[in-house]
Amino acid sequence: MTATPAGNRRTLLCADAVLPMTPGDPVITDGAVLVSGDTIEAVGPRSQLEQQAPDAEGREYGRAVLMPGLINTHSHSGLLRGTAEELPVWEWLQQYIDPMHRVLRPDEAETASWLCYAESLLAGTTTSVDMWRYMAGSARAAEQLGNRVVMVPYVGEAEGHDYFDTLDDNERLLDQWHGGAGGRVQVWVGLEHQSYATPAACRRAVALSHHFQTGLHTHSNEAEIERAESLRLHGISPIRALEKLGLLSPERVLLAHCVWLDDDEIRALADYNVGVAHNPCSNMKLASGSAPVEAMIEAGIAVGIGTDGEKENNNLDMFEEMKFASLLAKLRNMDASAWRSWDVLRAATIEGARALGMAHQIGSLEPGKQADIIAVKADTPRMTPFIPSGPLQNLHYNLVHSTLGGDVAMTMVAGRIVTENQVLLSGDLPAYIDEANAAAVRLLTRRDDWLASQKEVTSLA
Ligand SMILES: [Zn+2]
């Protein structure tokens, strides 16, 4: 089986329910989406669209839901799944993650992206923000596999953090890949964390984002200790520190986590039109805390949902992430009605697009937008009863709380079908899994060797 090339031909996707994720949360029963080339031409009742495009190739999904592909606003390619467990975030970084970055090789970084992009597509994620290393390899993976990706290098430019990618690497990637793969690959400016960069490097990062008219992405306000350190060292909150360094000034800024925020910081994020990636699984797993999502949304901030990496989660399943987002909000507020399911679905689609400054292009099924569409099976025990509309409508609740990524029957990106019936059509998944298993052993062995060498240095000193 090969992936369907987009071309300019027209395809009519039909299913028992279509969720356009447009204002008012409509559901079109017995609906259809007409795709022309890489673009959505029309969305509506099946009978109407069949008349409109009698020549289109029909694809019938039956008892299923057609909806926009999910947008993962914060992730990392990686090979450490299940090998970095049970430590709070700061110790976890020092013991597991930063030593891995010291020894990571470009071929291993590329192997990780092939694996993670395949995993994402199979689970219905059509767009990912990926903060990773040596990302020319990631771009090659995205070009072939067909996903949409915002590539953000992990940049460190300060003493003690010089083993990360550099701003020179970031600039080279911008030159080579920004707008690549027919526009599916975007490159932003990345910083691992503002404390991993000197003030001069921060200024250069901002200048690069202005020069290339692109966004900037970093982690912020993740752990309570990070906030305490900012106050101790600089006498200001982390968000005001970002502001002082100029890092809120690019036209599009996306911050991951934003767990520990005060009211002044929430106002600043809204004033600068900063987008936020909320990562509930990661925040629970690393015991970081519970982000004030409701207060951010009330302030007008675009809040998307992200899985974070394989090492913080341990999967890249945005359906599962929606469930955790919903449940964490209910627990945080001790209110079973907190974060309505429609709003959680919006965070994983159109609000995620807004957080990336891409809402004109993706995030909903509307004529003129990119054809990033998934079909979700509803003929399964966990989606029964299937009530897409009417007074007993349960579809939105079950998409958030019942569905898993493995229920995705079809993933289309830019008009090209890249997975069908949980088979990756655009690449060789068994080969990527074999390569990732081999690469992970090499990487973990070198990480252990490096950690052992540090112990020797310490004991000699
Ligand atoms: Zn992260």
Image: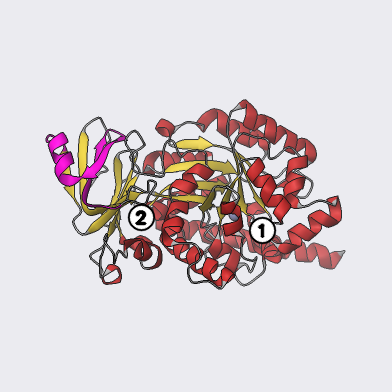
Magenta includes 50? Answer: yes
Q: Residue furthest top?
A: 211
Local secondary structure at mark 1: loop
Report whether residue 314 is seen: no
| The one of 301 and 124 positioned closer to us in this rendering | 301
Residue shown at 34% from the left, 62% from the top: 406
Task: Tell me the colour scheme of the image.
Answer: secondary structure
Reply above or below: 384 against 41: below
Reply above or below: 301 against 397: above
Q: Residues within 10 Å of mark 2 (few under 14, many from 20)?
A: many
Taking the image in four quarters, ligand 1 sits in the one at bottom right
Q: Amino acid at mark 2?
A: Leu
Task: Locate residue 446, reporting x and y percent.
Answer: 62, 59
Separation of marks 2 and 1 at Cα, in angstroms: 29 Å
Magenta includes 421? Answer: no
Report whether residue 212 is seen: yes
Q: In the drawing, does residue 399 fall left or right of residue 219?
A: left
Task: Locate residue 116, reporting x and y percent.
Answer: 45, 53
The residue beneath circle 1 is 222
The residue beneath circle 2 is 122
Q: On the rendered image, what quadrant is the C terminus found in?
A: bottom right
Task: Locate residue 58, reporting x and y percent.
Answer: 16, 43
Q: Amino acid at mark 1?
A: Glu
The magenta span reads 27-56
**Residue 243: quadrant of the picture:** top right
